[in-house]
Amino acid sequence: MWNQIYNPLGSAALSTLAAAIPVVTLLVLIASGKVKAHLAAIIALILANLVAIFVFTMPANMSIRASLLGVVTGVFPIGWIVLNVIFLYRITVETGRFELLQRAIGGVTTDRRLQLLLIAFAFGAFFEGASGFGTPVAITAAILIGLGFSPLAASGLSLIANTAPVAYGALGTPIQGLASVTGLDPYTLGAMVGRQLPFFSLLVPFWLIWAFAGFRGMMQIWPAILVTGVAFAIPQFVISNYINPWIVDIGASLISMGCLILFLKVWQPKELWLSPKLRGNDESAATMKPPKPMDTTKLTQPQLWGALLPWIIVCIVMLIWGTGMFKSWANAIFVWNYPVPELDKMIMKVPPVAARPTPEAAVFSFTYLSFTGTGMLLAALVSGVLMGISPAKMIVEYGRTIRLCAISLITISAMLAIGTLTRLSGVDATLGLAFAATGVLYPFFGTLLGWLGVALTGSDTASNVLFGNLQKITSEQLGLSPILMSAANSSGGVMGKMIDAQSIVVASTATNWYGHEGTILRYVFLHSIALACLVGVLVMLQAYVYPFTAMVLK
């Protein structure tokens, strides 16, 4: 048995600096653009092992086993999702259904800003609610690149859009994870998050279009942005506070999409924005072919249903795969839990990170049938059969998809290895304790702790599991509401989703823009920081300033 050590150097400042080495190295190497993402991840993983072993005194065999557990977790379930999303996208392109989808969207609007609202924000939120874990970025970025958006626009804007829905992703999995480690009621936590994120559900669509088209371009379509944001924010609040936290994204996204489409039947901007490139210097524009003029010929009814068929199948399958009933059934049929020898429950999380000494689980759960990626593969196969693709052709296309995604799968696995190792070694807890030492400013920095957790792990669920109990303990010591600060961990975390390396690799894979992960990171980084700080300001107001304090649940 090995106990985690959170101040191995006897100085909180020095220990925090040592703990930051792997993640800072990873982000700097990727942002430099001079080191490929998979090499940057491998270098950062080596450094993470050295820091864990030689600074935090983690036994070397535990450090290596933790890294290998993370590698496998990177493939299943995360890489498995990305692989099958790209496979679905490729077969829709091969059959010409994707071109029909382009025409269907063009039938709603040819304005690129409005397409972003419809696809990146509203449609992406649906997939976040149904499956999460990289699915929305992969799908929306692939659709946008197919519509002619530049690689940087498709990648970066999909990442920015996939923020406000994240706390309720995968049918409320982050809320459930937060409840499991804090012991607080998931309905209360979900309701508190629903009193924070609707402000940003209204703001993010404006932010998204401003990032793409500038302030003037944004103001030209402000009525449509307002309709989209309000139609998402109000249901997000109502469902989370008066129904449950599991179906928030699904309900809000469908209402938002429906309201936007209906609004566009009676309103269109005076000036259409047809450029698929980001305003200003879009360095990815040089790598893209000039987009073909979009065919706006009205689709026949059979063509329209043919274009939507694969995505309707995906929606149905993802809704089924996300339910607890299906997961229970699937896991009863096939589940293989592998406790990692000499690692599982051999590491003790200790106070102040845990209320009492708690052994850390290190189990690889191979629940193949219930994996989101398996559902995505089934949707792709069913779509392929209904679109008339032969089994042999699908096998060939799947082989091509594996070759296309190979480097990305290596990168994602290395990223997850870093996240798993830092969690089990206590390195990330050391970073969290540095935030917890900020006293009266803790509501602000505690929110940024959630942001850091998602940036490190790539998952709001993982961040909540990692830091949720620390948030509860620290808030109680400072006389703050544990419900407020636990919810703030999840709300702040959503803004870290756009800069976590895993999501960036998913975006570069979906847009076939390999080797440019640094460009994507540089583009979204300041957006991520700014939005996270705004969430921190809101939480500070909710902690100390009336009437915001009246929003805090007891």
Image: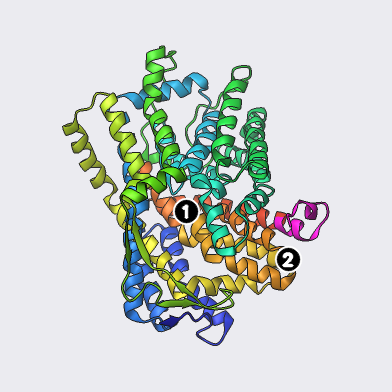
54 with respect to 240 (left or right): left
Q: Secondary structure at mark 2?
A: loop
The residue singled out by tag 2 in the image is 480
* Main SS of residues in magenta: helix
- Where residue 333 appears, as percent x and y from the top left, is 31, 48
Q: Earlier in the sequence, mark 2 or mark 1?
A: 2
Amino acid tagged 1? Leu
Foreground of the two, 170 or 533: 170
Query: Residue at 41% of width from left, 24% of height from top?
Result: 308
The dot on residue 521 is 1
**Span highlighted in magenta in the image:** 539-554
> Which circle, 2 or 1, is nearer the viewer?
2
Q: Residues within 10 Å of mark 1 (few under 14, many from 20)?
A: many
Say if 9 sits above or below 475 in the image. below
Q: Secondary structure at mark 1?
A: helix
Query: Residue at 54% of width from left, 42% of height from top?
Result: 161
Q: What is the quadrant of residue 354 in the picture?
A: bottom right
Badge count = 2
Query: Residue at 37% of width from left, 78% of height from top?
Result: 50
Distance from Cα at disc 2 to Cα at disc 1 = 34 Å
Say if 346 sits above or below 104 in the image. below
